[in-house]
Each structure stands twice: as structure tokens, then as C-alpha cells.
Image: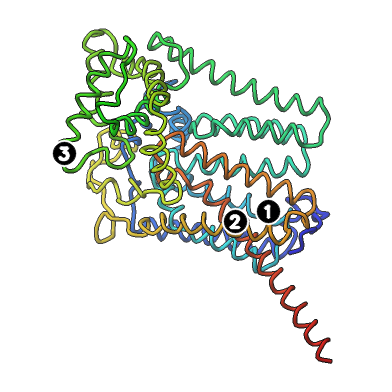
Amino acid sequence: MTQNQTIPVLPFTKWLWKNRVNRIYLLIAVSIILLQFFIFKIFYPYPNFLPDSFSYMEAALKNQAINLWPIGYSKFLLWFSFLTRSHVLLVLLQYVLLQSAILYFLFSVAYFLGPSKWLFLILLFVSLFNPLLLHVSNFISSDALFASLSLIWFTQLLWLLYKPGLRLLLLHAFVLLFVFTVRYNALYYPVISMITILLTKMSNRLRWTAIGAIVLLLGAFITFTQYSYYKKTNTSQFSPFGGWQLASNALFAYAHVPPGKRVEVPAQYKQLQTMVDRHTDSLEQLSERPDAQLGIYYLWNECSPLKQNMYQVELKKKTVQPFGVWAQMGNSYNTYGSWLVKQYPMAFIQYYLWPNLINYYVPRPEFMASYNMGKDTIDQAGVDWFRLKTNKVNNNTRNSVINICDYYPIALALINLLFLLSLAGFSLLKGFSKSNKLRKKIYYLQLLIWLSNAVFSVLASPIVLRYQIFPMLITQSLMIVFMNYIIQESRQKSLQVQTLIQQKLI
């Protein structure tokens, strides 16, 4: 693979199908994808359920406009239910979408960068034969769909760098909307899209049409969501969960602040702060603290001061539904969490940001470590949604533990480490300066997304393995490309040294 590889003359679709080698690779890849799925389903005939699953299904069943989580995945379930309620076909669709997005990404990279046959086969192998993709697709959760849409979004950005056009730009705006509705980890995606559009060579008319389409679609969704919350809870907000999450993150830090260093809180937080202080003081008496590890303790545990405070508010507003009270707390918890972070920045860095940075490099398997949370039954919502005859679910393995997922945190840590080392080696060996303009743009875009994802993930919420599927796939691909360049350059320099030595000996 040369750093100034020219783009094929043939359009992408013709290059993909009419080129005999590419067509064979594609057909073999599709066969492998389907074969892996059917083998996997022998061992795991039912989907994998986690607490979020039943919330998604309930929102789909009631066709809700808002929910605890972004509404996109519930709408996906609803639309799919018009065709069938088969859980096998749903998981198959999620897996095929994810693998199709990977193939779209890899073949696009091959089209732009022209890797050698063996390098492309390595990229294809490590992506296709990845058991993690099967397990994440088996969840009744937004994880696989979000990773699929994120890969499509990213690959479209690569095509925008190469050849922007109105059709592609409008499709990109809609993909951005879809991924934005599925998970709010995509909050930074529009910024990267608009930066890419602003820096890509195109007519001003086309540029502002594309940006206008993004702003219009996302603005309409945000406005509709805010209106839906106002209509149902009498509070205008986009994501109550964001306020809960910020307060939870802040409490992981505040729980370690000594009583003597606590400052007086504003009047509106007095009741909540009393509960928080009482709770954190009681945690000090425990040999094993439930908040010792970043997670969902302050969000969902019934003993959490955030939940206890919500119940106090709920008692005073008997006419308000539980969801309404939960949503109404979002704004106040957002301001409370912000206040805690500002008052105790060093504690926040030490007890939340630093542990979460470690989580980013070695993410916990969390629910991926076991099948159906170790239970052999599911909630009635799952039985009703998939029209099952019983609430019993089983697997054909020795137990409910998914051992393979225990190795992925280490694998992801190695991928990130090797990526940083290969990036350093690529830079030192003048890989960027030897690359053509398109290559440089592709590399810089991937680095921007890698850095943006790292910063956003660490700041947003405690990181777990299933959240990192998309960054893992693009990071390992770029790592392999960089390492290949380093190996080639090392061989070339070695040959030059050998030639020089031979010449001197002669």
C-alpha cells in the first residue's frame, strides 16, 4: 500500500461487484456472517435481556414519543413489529445491519486507500470473526443499532471528503438524525459533520444546504421532544436522563469529600443535600461500599438519595405519574450536579474522571458478562412483545456466564495502546507528510473522532464495553493501517542499509 495510492476509475458499486476479487471477498463475507449467526443461535436461541430492554419494549408497545431512553430504538422495534414479532429475525436484522455497516466501511477504506491484499484480508478477518458483535446484536438494546448507524455516518463522512454531492449530503443528514434519536452519545456527531462540510471543497450553495438540512432535522426532533416532555410533565427539556446522569456522576465524587470540607448549599438544594449527606455518611460505615465502582448505583438503586428525593417529591404530587416525576427531576438534578462539580472539581477529577478514563481503556463487560442477567426467566413485557408461550428462556451452554466477553476489556486496552504507539511510529516515520491529501483528511478525521469519543465518553457517563463497539472497530482498523506502514518502512530502511553495506564491502 503506497501513501499516494490513486482512487479506482470505476464507481464504487461497479468496483465492488465487477472486480472479481472484490466480489469473491464480498460473497465469502456474507456467507461467513450468516453461518456465524446460525451457529450462534444454536447456543443462544433467545435474545439477551437487560433492564433497559423492557423499557424499550414498553415504549414501543405504547408508541410513546418520549421514554427514559432516547426513543429511536423503541421506534425501530415498533416498525419491525409491523413485519414480525420474531425475536430470532430481530436479532438477525441487528446483526446483519452491523456487519453490513462494517463491510461498507471496510470496502470504502479499501477503495480510498488501496491496501494490499493481505492487509485488507486482515482488516476483514478481525472485523468479521469478532464474537463480540454477535453478543451485542443479541441484546434487546440500542447498542448494535447505534454502532451500525455510527459506522454508516462515519463512512459517509469519508465519502464527503472524496466527492460531496447533494444526494449524499441529504442522506447524511437523515442518518445523523436517526443515530441521534437512538443514543445521545451522538451529541458530538453533528459538530464533526458540520466541521467536515465546512472544510470540504464544494459550492457555498451546497455547503449551506447540507448544514441547513442537519440543523432543520435535528432542530425539529429536539423541539418535538421538548414539546412532548412539556405536554406530559409540564417541564420543557430535551433529556431528563442527562440531569440524572450528571448528578449521579457528581455524587460519586462528593461521596468522598470529608464532612469538614463540605460547603453550604443553596437553599433550593437543602432537602436533597440533607439526604445526600446522611447517605454518604452511612456509606462510610460499610466494609464494602455499593458506590466503590462507577456504575448505576446513584441512578437506579432504591437507596440512592436521588431516588429517595424523587419519592419525596412524588408523595407531594399524587396526581403526577412516576415517569412525570422522574422527568421533572431532570432539570433540578442537572443544576445540582453542575453545582457539585464546580464546588469540588478536584474530587470530581479524582473519583469520577480518572476512574472513568481507566474504564475507557479497560471497559467493564457489565451485562455482557452473562446471559439474561443470569436468570432463566424474563419480565412479562418481553413475553407480550415477542408473543412467547412462556417466560422461560434458556441457552445451550454450561451456564449463563459469557466467558468470551471477559477477554474483551483487555483486548480493547491493547488496541488503544497499540493504536497510540502505531500513531507515534507513523508520525515519526513521516507517514502524514508522505500521504496524499485524501489520505491525510481520512487519517485526521479518524483521529478527531477517536479523540472526541474519548473525551465525550469519559465526561458523559460510566463507560462499559457495549458502549465502545463503534470506536473499537474504527480504532483497530486505523491501528492496523499504521502498523502496516511502519512494517513497510522498516523493511525498506533495512534493505537500504543492507544495500549500503554491500556497496561499501565491494
Which one is closest to the eye, mark 1 or mark 3?
3
Image coordinates of residue 327 in percent, x first then y, are: 36, 18
| Most foreground residue, 280 or 452 | 280
Q: Amino acid at mark 3?
A: Leu
Mark sitting earlier along the chain (1/3): 1
Quarter of the image for residue 211 reads top right
Number of the label disc, if any, that sits on residue 286: 3
Image coordinates of residue 212 in percent, x first then y, are: 70, 22
Q: Is residue 361 visible?
A: yes
Q: Amino acid at mark 2?
A: Ser
Is the residue marked by circle 2 packed among few (<14), some (14-19), or many (20+) residues within 10 Å? many
Q: Is residue 60 visible?
A: no
Secondary element at image label 3: loop
Quadrant position of the N terminus in the picture: bottom right
Confirm or deny contact between disc 1 and disc 2 (CB under 8 A). Answer: yes
Query: In 3D space, how far apart are the residues under numbered discs 1 and 2 (Cα atoms)?
Result: 9 Å
Residue labelled with disc 2: 477
Confirm or deny contact between disc 2 and disc 3 (CB under 8 A). Answer: no
Secondary element at image label 1: helix
Query: In 3D space, how far apart are the residues under numbered discs 2 and 3 (Cα atoms)?
Result: 45 Å
Query: In 3D space, how far apart are the residues under numbered discs 1 and 3 (Cα atoms)?
Result: 53 Å
Measured along the vertical axis of the image, is residue 338 above or below residue 152?
above
